[in-house]
Image (cartoon, rainbow, N blue to C red):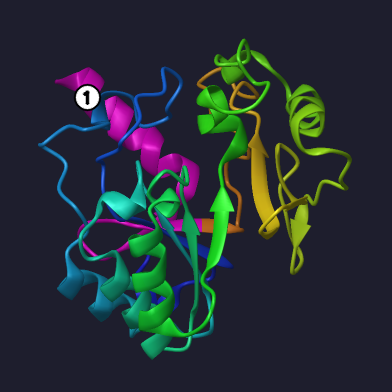
Amino acid sequence: MIKPENNTFHTLSIQTTYQCNMKCANCYLGHMLNNPDYADIDLKVFEDSISKLPGKCDIRLIGAEPTMNDNLFELIRITRKYNHRPSLLTNGLKLGQEDYVIKMCDKYNRTTGITFPIMMRIKSVGKMGNHLDTYTYNINELINIAKENFGDFEPVFEIDGYKEKNTCTYKFQTEIGVMYGKCTDWTIDDDGLPDRGSKRRGILTKEGMIMPFFEFYEEEVNVKKKK
């Protein structure tokens, strides 16, 4: 665990909330999903941490479902205030509400990167139907499932020199423009952690410290088991 001023991660995930408007059986949050014991990110802790990062960073606003956090627009504003790159990992349901999208566009007057976690939450969309339990699929199978739904694409395993062998991103064309998706194989390790020790992604803790993304969730699960 390191202080924000010592951050070395390319992408910093922000657990904006543990609330979601879906209940996917395979959500990696497990017992934490929609659990009132897990609070939304504290704005003061967030800004204090973001302001100390030593270099420009990709700030990934995640959940459960980040649009369930009433302070989401403020989190985006703070991210841009300190010249970082915000992106939103969403299931897209609230983006189907025109007034919500207009409010977001009017407030920022430019696009926030939006990524749809296709393999995790697509269970109610398109042809995914019987592919709910994505934990049983390896990375190549996940990529093929995505291609069945969105057409051919070239999976990207390396971003700015940071590479993960069990996680890839991809882009696909839709009626409203280019969208991005992600595939992660959660079955690689015996304990379910893909790309252990990855230097590409870190996550901000509620105390304002930074730790490796996957190890963060492993620790939360172990704490639950000890209880």
Decide if residue 191 is on the left or right side of residue 218.
Answer: right
Q: Residue 35 appears at what percent x and percent y?
A: 17, 32
Q: Residue furthest front?
A: 98
Closest to the observer, 61 or 126 = 126
Give above or below for 136 relative to 224.
Answer: above
At label 1, the amino acid type is Lys
Where, quadrant-wise, is the N terminus in this rendering?
Answer: bottom left
Tag count: 1
Give above or below for 213 relative to 47.
Answer: above
Magenta-colored stretch includes residue 18: no
Q: Residue 123 appears at what percent x and percent y?
A: 54, 23
Q: Secondary structure at mark 1?
A: helix
Where, quadrant-wise, is the C terminus in this rendering?
Answer: top left
Q: Residue at x 20, y 60 (%)?
A: 70
Magenta-drawn segment = 202-227
Res. 1 in view? no
**Which picture quadrant has residue 145?**
top right
Disc 1 residue crowd, few under 14, some 14–19, many 20+, Cα 10 Å: few
Q: Residue furthest left?
A: 37
Q: Residue 54 appears at what percent x and percent y?
A: 46, 85
**Which picture quadrant has residue 222?**
top left
Res. 100 in view? yes
Closest to the observer, 193 or 15 = 15
Q: Residue at x 52, y 85 (%)?
A: 55
Q: Residue 192 appears at what percent x and percent y?
A: 53, 23
Give above or below for 16 relative to 38.
Answer: below
Decide if residue 62 is on the left or right side of residue 74.
Answer: right
Q: Which residue is mark 1?
A: 224
